[in-house]
């Protein structure tokens, strides 16, 4: 059996390489597109869809991870674009998710078959074009046999990824295609295959539970026990559209996130209008892998931003929301509700507030391997990142103070004539 291993791009250049014994993973829940989301992304001047403003505030969070995962709960089936109940989102969403920093999307959920065979296949084609790794749905059984379990290799780590859904809203799985279902007989075979590949960790993404419920039900608990017995290290749940607790056992070295909630949607009822971004570090020492520092940040969907719907992380929300008066109360309610609920339901997982650094983006998607930089740029230090498709981004400097970073950006723009240089925030 041939296995396909995805090797993620590495950071190189003037910044110290990451310790290969540590890997940072980030997980978010349901990525959806209701009609309002689609309409907000449409730019009437250009006639195109643009999602940059939706993700601009949370981009540093996603880019802080070595590998970032999300649940794509929609199809990319082409026009006509539509939200609930049978989703088809613009292709631009996938490309913006990639630019935001997502690496892997799981696609097995109750909306996988919304637009039939063509929609399922086209979704995978678009994700491939965007450079996003995916698993959970497959064009053919032969394809599943070749690429499942999904293997992710990054900086000396090997992760096995499994993804399943409870169903497809009563829509038959399109003939010839495969949508992974929560079938314990098949899943047991998949776990055996995954363990045979000797990964450092097995990650399972179940689409399970009951919608609009804040605690896991008996079926979720039964399946979680099954996954952990089979060898899962991390279980990352989705579907309820509300945050449920995250339980971590250092003794067993296992973590279960019952529901990561809505990441992108226009579901506005109480408990539905925000997200958790869960971060987990893996440490490999003397051949033993351990889960460390699981923590989360909250983000809220600002539904009446001036130019688009936007995800607002907690650490900038207080300042930003004060400028949008009719959002202050629902923002406060979501944050208060979520913190109270997660404090009660979580086990050994706490909220973590990030520390930002700032870097100056000089050139994006460059094909130049070693540009000749002016002395003023070399003074601040130049380095590059290389993504999955081999695209190179060039950066200068690393600053903890935003005002200092903006002063250097202005200097580079004026004295070095880099008019397109821009500031990017990163989270340590």
Image: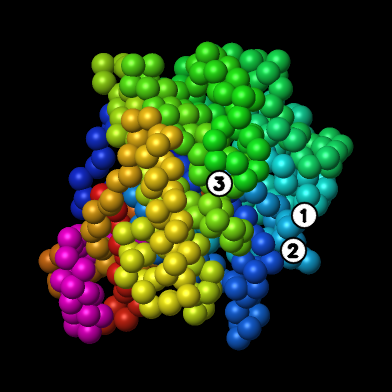
Identify the magenta region: 392-416
Mark 2 secondary-structure assignment = loop
Residue at image location 78% in from the left, 49% down from the top: 114
Residue 394 highlighted magenta (yes or no): yes
Tag 1–tag 2 contact (CB < 8 Å): yes
Q: Dot 2 corresponds to which residue?
A: 82
Residue at image location 38% in from the left, 30% down from the top: 347
Quadrant location of the N terminus in the rendered image? top right
Q: In this view, does 157 lie above or below 337?
A: above
Residue at image location 76% in from the left, 29% down from the top: 141
Is tag 3's residue or tag 2's residue first in the polypeptide sequence? 2
Q: Dot 1 corresponds to which residue?
A: 86
Q: In this view, does 156 lie to the left or right of 303?
A: left
Q: Residues within 10 Å of mark 2 (few under 14, many from 20)?
A: many
Nearer to me, 202 or 287: 202
Of the residues tagged 3 and 2, which is closer to the observer?
Answer: 3
Is tag 1's residue or tag 3's residue first in the polypeptide sequence? 1
Q: Is residue 342 left or right of residue 223?
A: left
Regarding residue 185, the answer to whether it shows in the image is: yes
Could you say which disc has been placed on residue 242 in the image?
Answer: 3
Query: Could you say where residue 79 lies in the image, as x and y percent from the top left?
Result: 77, 65
């Amino acid at each position: 059996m041939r296995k396909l291993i995805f090797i993620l791009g590495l950071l190189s250049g003037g910044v110290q390489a990451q310790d290969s014994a540590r890997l940072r993973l980030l997980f978010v829940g349901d990525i959806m597109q209701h009609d309002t989301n689609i309409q907000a992304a449409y730019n009437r001047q250009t006639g195109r869809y643009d999602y940059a403003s939706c993700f601009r505030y949370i981009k540093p969070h996603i880019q802080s991870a070595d590998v970032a995962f999300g649940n794509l709960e929609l199809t990319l089936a082409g026009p006509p674009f539509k939200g609930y109940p049978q989703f088809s989102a613009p292709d631009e969403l996938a490309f913006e998710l990639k630019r935001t920093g997502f690496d892997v999307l799981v696609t097995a959920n109750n909306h996988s078959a919304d637009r039939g065979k063509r929609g399922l296949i086209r979704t995978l084609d678009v994700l491939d074009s965007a450079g996003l790794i995916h698993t959970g749905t497959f064009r053919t059984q032969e394809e599943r046999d070749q690429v499942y379990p999904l293997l992710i290799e990054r900086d000396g780590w090997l992760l096995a990824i499994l993804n399943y859904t409870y169903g497809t809203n009563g829509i038959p799985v399109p003939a010839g295609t495969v949508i992974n279902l929560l079938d314990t007989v098949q899943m047991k075979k998949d776990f055996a295959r995954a363990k045979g590949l000797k990964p450092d960790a097995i990650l399972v993404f179940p689409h399970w539970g009951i919608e609009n419920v804040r605690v896991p039900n008996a079926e979720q608990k039964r399946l979680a026990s099954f996954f952990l017995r089979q060898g899962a290290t991390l279980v990352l749940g989705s579907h309820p559209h509300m945050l449920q607790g995250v339980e971590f056992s250092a003794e067993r070295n296992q973590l279960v996130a019952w529901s990561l909630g809505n990441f992108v949607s226009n579901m506005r009822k109480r408990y539905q209008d925000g997200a958790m971004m869960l971060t987990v570090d893996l440490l490999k020492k003397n051949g033993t892998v351990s889960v460390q520092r699981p923590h989360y940040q909250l983000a809220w969907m600002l539904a009446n931003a001036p130019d688009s719907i936007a995800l607002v992380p907690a650490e900038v929300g207080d300042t930003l929301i004060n400028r949008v008066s009719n959002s202050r109360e629902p923002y406060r309610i979501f944050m208060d509700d979520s913190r109270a609920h997660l404090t009660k339901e979580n086990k050994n997982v706490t909220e973590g507030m990030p520390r930002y650094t700032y870097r100056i983006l000089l050139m994006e998607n460059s094909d130049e391997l070693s540009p000749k930089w002016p002395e003023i740029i070399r003074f601040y230090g130049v380095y590059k990142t290389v993504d999955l498709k081999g695209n190179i981004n060039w950066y200068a400097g690393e600053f903890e103070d935003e005002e200092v970073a903006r002063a250097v950006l202005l200097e580079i723009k004026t004295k070095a004539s880099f008019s397109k240089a821009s500031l990017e925030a990163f989270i340590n």
